Image: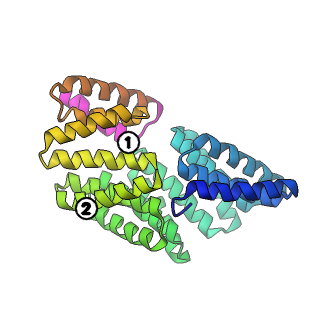
Amino acid sequence: MNQGHYDEGIRWLEEQLDIAERAADKQGLTTLYTNLGIIYLEKGALDSALLCLEKGLALSEELGNKLFMTICIGSIGSVWEKKGDYTKAMQNFERDLVLCQELGDKQGTAIACGLIGDLLSVIGEFDRAIEYLEKNLNLSRELNYKKGIAKALNTLGDTWFYKGDNHRSVAYYNEAIEYAREMGNKLVLGYSLVEKGLVHVFANELANARQVLEEGRDIALALGNADLTFGANILRAQVIMAEGNRPEALRQLQQLLALARTEREEAAVHFELRKVADHPTTHHLRAFTLYRNMYARTPQYIYKVRLDELEKEAG
């Protein structure tokens, strides 16, 4: 999973699942369903992830295995976050944190703090987010839990960018990239590279942006991760636009629009197209409508920022 070979990981776990089911090995089934759910979550197959994690949770509750309960609860929260139900996500994250603290599980506590901090950052509560993310980072460093360190650093990079401190943001991304390389965690590495590239675009450091973009996009394509690939492709169009090649930026954005899988992707493409299209009003209106609808359902800070920008342009 950490190397991005999700289907191979799923194949091995499903093979073990058959053995555990024939042996009526409940602890084995608990472990396997939990791990299978986590891989489906990382792959982006959210319904399959939820199904496996709920089976893992039911079995861990039946066995009284609180450690696996915490893992399942936190992962279920992540599924709900990705599905856009932030209330359910936060309820699960907070329950996870309480259980981990009761168990004295430092790594679990670090992970739960990271999940809460990440969600707080997404909804724009940056000071509270930093508080939880720093707890996550400090505990992860104490335990030498490298995946936790890399994820905390990555999210702190996001958060400081939103707070307007590009220098601090890039410093966090750089350290996240180092840890992700050291671990061989390609997913965290890919996101850190692409998100760092966005900061460079905003700072008009286009050579730096292009350098991290190319590596991040190669990783996204190698992993077959659709969300990361879309992020890299949007960043590529932004770099080309900033370099002054309007026709090529327009061509690439039109291709992305034709391939958009979700409202979020369509909105992001229209948001960029309004900057380079011959008739920007159509794209402006479509982006505004999509972001307004999405923000009503899922109050992401970035949606609000873009709505404000679009409203200001409209006068």
Q: Is residue 24 above or below residue 313?
A: below
Quarter of the view holding residue 307: top left
Which residue carries the number 1 mark? 301
Helix, strand or loop for disc 2: helix
Give the mark, 1 or 2, whose residue is nearer the N terminus: 2
Helix, strand or loop for disc 1: helix
Residues shaded magenta: 297-315
Inspect the image, locate mark 2, and give the three-letter code of the amino acid beneath it. Answer: Gln
The residue under the point 25% across, 31% down is 310
Q: Is residue 32 magenta?
A: no
Q: Is residue 272 left or right of residue 27?
A: left
Query: Marks 1 and 2, how far apart in space?
Result: 28 Å
Q: Residue furthest left?
A: 244
Look at the image and tell me in which quarter the N terminus lies: bottom right
The 10 Å Cα crowd at callout 1, few under 14, some 14 to 19, many 20 or more, is some
Circle number at residue 312: none
